[in-house]
Image: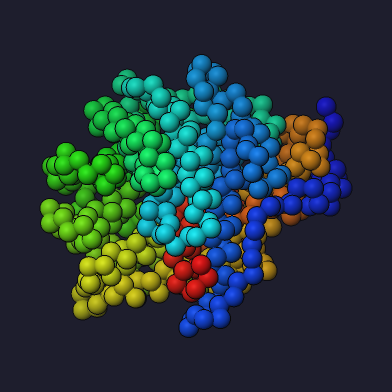
Amino acid sequence: MASFTLGLLLSCIFTTLLLCNATHYHNPVQRHRHHPRVASHNYKDALTKSILFFEGQRSGKLPPNQRLNWRRDSGLSDGSAAHVDLVGGYYDAGDNVKFGFPMAFTTTMLSWSVIEFGGLMKGELQNAKEAIRWATDYLLKATAHPGTIYVQVGNAISDHACWERPEDMDTPRSVYKIDANTPGSEVAGETAAALAAASLVFRRSDPVYSKLLVRRAMRVFEFADKHRGAYSNGLRKVVCPFYCDYSGYQDELLWGAAWLHKATKNPSYLGYIQSNGQILGAAQFDNTFGWDNKHVGARILLSKAFLVQKLPALHEYKGHSDNFICSILPGSSSTQYTPGGLLFKMNDSNMQYVTSTSFMILAYAKYLTSSRQVVNCGGTTVTPKKLKAMAKRQVDYLLGDNPQKMSYMVGYGPRYPQRIHHRGSSLPCIASHPAKIQCSAGFSVMKSQSPNPNILVGAVIGGPDQNDRFPDDRSDYEQSEPATYINAPLVGALAYLAHSFGQL
């Protein structure tokens, strides 16, 4: 097999740029002649790219309309180790493992983005639906056998010991599952939420598929609730520390029930929420919403049932949601912002909390507007308009209005990260380097200062530190790695902003 060195990479870069980055998508020039406000950003372009990113994360047999052409088929035997079909789905971030927990959360948030703001997406709506369906087709396979959910393909420790393209994978594609003996209520609850949310996306355009999704969601939720336990216990050596469940599984049960209530209107789910809400942490104080902790999302979603659908039984969730809003206001003792104004939760992949919080704020502002209500934080009245401005500031920072003058979305704006922590993006594509790149050979690239030859258009990375600093270092996965769950809620926020400024 041909040897692979850093020198060979350098000689490949020009060829790679020519062969691998002819991305096919229509991006017309925007004109805003009749809109009263002028935006500092092209939110429509960012929306297009935020969805396109998901095509770069695809696993399985790629379709003829694949637009990121440097990717090829991969993981075509996934599931065979357990004699099941687990081909498809998404790689979560910059590695080649399929983690079911964050993939399901990604699916839920992509679906919620479409449910709330899909009507504003115009030509991007179909691309967003395709991104969702790529995930739900996989989740249907993972839940095909009653009483069992396949929650991971690939051993993360073995995978992380290699730096290779997904198309070259030769690490074990081990299959891991939960069942009655090894429960996993958090991943099962999130999977139920994802399937239920997606069923609403396809309710009109594909009612047969929608019914399949919601029926499966009901079955998966029943399993999650009946066989309670954390997958981080039974599968600790496999899922920790990568996607270990730190917040418990109670939030996913409340979240899953909330989505099933919305998708089915079955009063049994309302009864479940009323009976179990407090036990499952409905009033627990936390203001971090992401792939692990869903309490905030459940509160905001259930507040919609009260504010918009006028369901008085869920009135308390307005108060719970208001508490969240008050806790994230600039100046609040419970939330940190960088000197440049970015919401800062933690060093590792902080931008996921920026995008998820921005989406939550915009969704809640929409519900408040619909019901003509506001949030009262002590002596401060927070209007929907103020919430929208807060979310816009966070998205604008992400897109380049920051001390570094850098967009943290790859391919957007004049200056963006060049060395993201992503195997497929950093190594020459198949077209320019058909020979296999062996497991350890790629590390010479990972450690180099060369720009990534393949542009993972739309990828949003972990972002700057608490002092707005960003080194653009490929080995710094905390700041330089993209992830599907960073982009998913951003899709909805960008659709709202693009519409607000007359770009859609």
User: Is 175 located above or below residue 93 in the figure?
Assistant: above
The image quadrant that residue 300 belongs to is bottom left
Residue occupying image coordinates x 75% and y 42%? 429
Horizontal side of 395 relative to 281 (left or right) equals right
Picture coordinates of residue 94, whole percent (x, y): 60, 44
User: Is 382 located above or below residue 280 in the figure?
Assistant: below
The image quadrant that residue 480 belongs to is bottom right
Task: Give whichever of 62, 303 is nearer the camera.
Answer: 62
Residue occupying image coordinates x 31% and y 63%? 364
Horizontal side of 178 relative to 27 (left or right) equals left
Q: Quadrant of the N terminus?
A: top right
Residue occupying image coordinates x 87% and y 48%? 11
Horizontal side of 314 relative to 81 (left or right) equals left
- Looking at the image, can residue 379 be seen? yes
Q: Residue furthest bottom?
A: 36
Across the whole image, how many numbered discs are drawn on residues? 0
Residue occupying image coordinates x 17% and y 59%? 310
- Looking at the image, can residue 475 be seen? no
Task: Give whichever of 489, 199 is nearer the camera.
Answer: 199
Picture coordinates of residue 157, whole percent (x, y): 56, 32
Picture coordinates of residue 420, whole percent (x, y): 64, 52
User: Is 148 located above or below residue 37 in the figure?
Assistant: above
User: Is 274 located above or below residue 32 in the figure?
Assistant: above
Horizontal side of 337 relative to 411 (left or right) equals left
Q: Colour mode?
A: rainbow
Picture coordinates of residue 165, whole percent (x, y): 69, 37
